Image (spheres, helix red, strand yellow):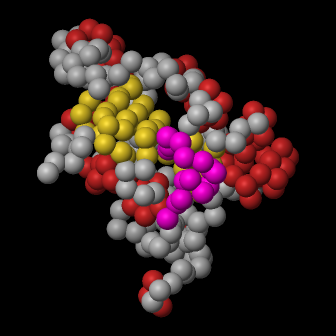
Amino acid sequence: MSDSAAPKPPVSGRAVDDLSYYRTDPVSFVRRGSRLHGKRKDSWDRLSGDYVIQVPRHHADTSVHAGFRFDADEAFGRTAPLTVEIGTGLGEAIASAAEAHPERNFLAVEVYLPGLAQLMARIDAKGLTNVRAVQANAPEVLDVMLEPGSVDELWIFFSDPWHKTRHHKRRLIKESFLPKAARVLAPGGTWRLATDWSDYAEQMRAILDASPDFSTLHAGERAGAESPLTRVRRGGLEGHEPDPGFTDELGGWAPRYEGRIRTSFEGKALAAGRLVFDLAYRREPEAG
């Protein structure tokens, strides 16, 4: 390995708080507190060595060095279909799915240390052996860490909507992200998404529908009066002015994925009067 490619230590100063410092694309997350206490600290101390993937860093403390590759068979001690969840939060969804599907492997991608520690606690409580986790920036995981075509399902539920127009460039799901997802998903693999904000849902639907790499699994479904988008616009939800004449003719919204439990985050969104938009797409085989 050349000196220029050698791993560099985590940085200090501005880059600790501004992770866009060394990146061409702004990161889609905000750093939060990382102190661990009580059961979370205990679970982290006991289990992280076995269940958290140790990643060589490049510049920032959530980066992935370009030379690192994740060997799923070695990490899990077996060969099985791999589900990757980006933004696992407190680990509720992935731990529940791993318990329900012991025949599958699950990789949690999260930057929030207390969330990963909570996932360790869930792994401990449920006696799970089919979950691994990595504390890393998701685009770098998809670009570098995961092998092409190695993922059976990719989940991204309730990623930060970055409401202000000037911050939309920070949204995770945008045109530049699609090739990253396409790279790691196996042909025929499934990408599942959910959001509780309608304009982000429309953005996701538009860019995925336009991509030759993906096809919706629910073309035309839940259109018209059945569409959650119609309900949001007609009802004046999310602060919109009510538009009684609006109709979402396109549809394409998936039914709620039965493998996604209602997390505490989703419960808060529903209690606030927001609707949930689900999307599901198939990774198309490469042409040629």
Q: Is residue 109 left or right of residue 143?
A: right
Q: What residue is rendered at 44% in x and 20% in y? A: 256
Q: Is residue 170 above or below residue 98?
A: below
Residue 85 in the image: x percent, y percent? Answer: 51, 42
Q: Does 81 lie within the magenta span?
A: yes
Residue 7 seen in the figure: yes
Q: Quadrant of residue 94?
A: top right
Residue 178 in the image: x percent, y percent? Answer: 30, 49
Q: What residue is rendered at 21% in x and 48% in y? A: 286
Q: What residue is rendered at 64% in x and 42% in y? A: 130
Q: Is residue 80 left or right of residue 215?
A: right
- Give the number of marks: 0
Q: Is residue 173 left or right of residue 50?
A: left
In the rendered image, the residue lying farthest to the front is 78
Residue 28 in the image: x percent, y percent? Answer: 44, 52
Q: What residue is rendered at 73% in x and 45% in y? A: 120
In the rendered image, the residue lying farthest to the bottom is 3
Residue 200 seen in the figure: no
First to last magenta residue range: 69-85
In the rendered image, the residue lying farthest to the left is 288
Residue 216 in the image: x percent, y percent? Answer: 26, 30
Q: Is residue 181 above or below residue 268?
A: below
Q: Does 175 lie within the magenta span?
A: no
Q: Is residue 124 above or below residue 249?
A: below
